[in-house]
Structure formats: structure tokens, C-alpha cells
Amino acid sequence: MTPDDPTLAQLVRRLADPVIVADSDGVIVFWNDAAERVFGWTADHAIGMSLDLIIPDRQRHAHWQGYHRVMATGQTRYDHDLLRVPAMHADGERRSIAFTVTLLTDTGGAVTGIAAVVRDETQRWAGERSLRAELTRCRVAAGEAVDGE
């Protein structure tokens, strides 16, 4: 398979996990089928838009500080480590996502953009939150039982 192989393009487009590619300014240039499903925006709508499309207002400042630093330095720890952050769906609902990134470079090595492979962890986070709440209820009940002896 070569980078120009249509089979490779089809593979990336049809991966089960969202793949989002943005240029050095944070403008979306690729948005696969899974990104449509997870974030609710079609590729036709998302391509050409800023990554702000999926970044909650409260996280935008921190996101852009980090993004511009990565574009300037060509360094990120999230090429190996998962970054877990909130994101926004087209319907306004928050999502919990985790992703890794790959820096894209030109032939001279200058960073030209970033590709992210995303996981929707919304259900997992909701399940963990529910388990923590249940654990707290159990601890309170156990404490009341001990105190009430």
C-alpha cells in the first residue's frame, strides 16, 4: 500500500474510530465516517471549519495554547499518551473523548498539521461516574451502620 493508494484512503475513511486531520491553523481538512457518527457533523460541514467545532468553550483557550505550541515546536507527548478531554456533539451534548495525535510534516520536516485518532469514552465515563456514586452511597451506609450500633 502506498500513501496514494485508494484502498488506504478507504480504510481511514471507514475506520471504527474517528480520524480528524487539521492543518497548522487548526482548520479541519479530513473528517472520517466515524467522526460524523461521534460528533454529529457531516464531513461536508466539518471540513474547512475550525476545531472549535468540537471544543467546548471552556477548553478553547487551553486547547489553542497547546495546539500552537505543538505547531511551533513539533513536540507532543500525545503521540504515545492518551489525552482525555471533553468535546461537543452537534446537538450541544458533551462527549468524553480520548485521543492520540500524529504530527504531519512537509518534506523539510516542518509541521503542517496534525492527525488525531479519537475514542468516544462517553459511556465509559458515565459508567465510572455511576460506580463512584454507588461506592459513595455504600460507604455512607456502612458508616451509618457502624455509627448506629
Image (spheres, helix red, strand yellow):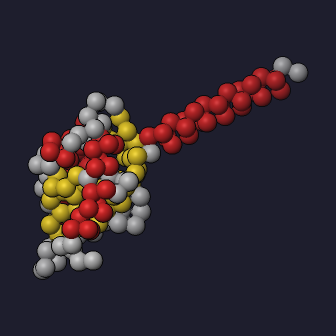
Q: Specify whether 78 is left or right of 4.
A: right
- Residue 127: % across, % down: 55, 37
The answer to whether residue 142 is seen in the rendering is yes
Image quadrant occupied by the C terminus:
top right
The answer to whether residue 26 is seen in the rendering is no
Label total for image: 0
- Give the vertical position of 145 relative to 125 (above or below): above
Q: Residue at x 71, y 30 (%)?
A: 138
Image quadrant occupied by the N terminus:
bottom left
Q: Residue at x 38, y 54 (%)?
A: 16
Q: Nearer the viewer, residue 137 or 1?
A: 1
Q: Specify whether 98 is left or right of 11.
A: right
Q: Nearer the viewer, residue 134 or 3?
A: 3
When asked about the image quadrant of residue 53, the answer is: top left
- Give the vertical position of 1 relative to 65 (above or below): below
Q: Residue at x 29, y 30 (%)?
A: 92
Q: Residue at x 34, y 43 (%)?
A: 38
Which residue is at the far front? 7
- Residue 81: % across, % down: 42, 63
Q: Specify whether 77 is left or right of 28.
A: right
- Give the vertical position of 101 relative to 140 (above or below): below
- Give the vertical position of 83 relative to 61 (above or below): below
- Residue 29: % across, % down: 15, 55
Which residue is at the far bottom? 108
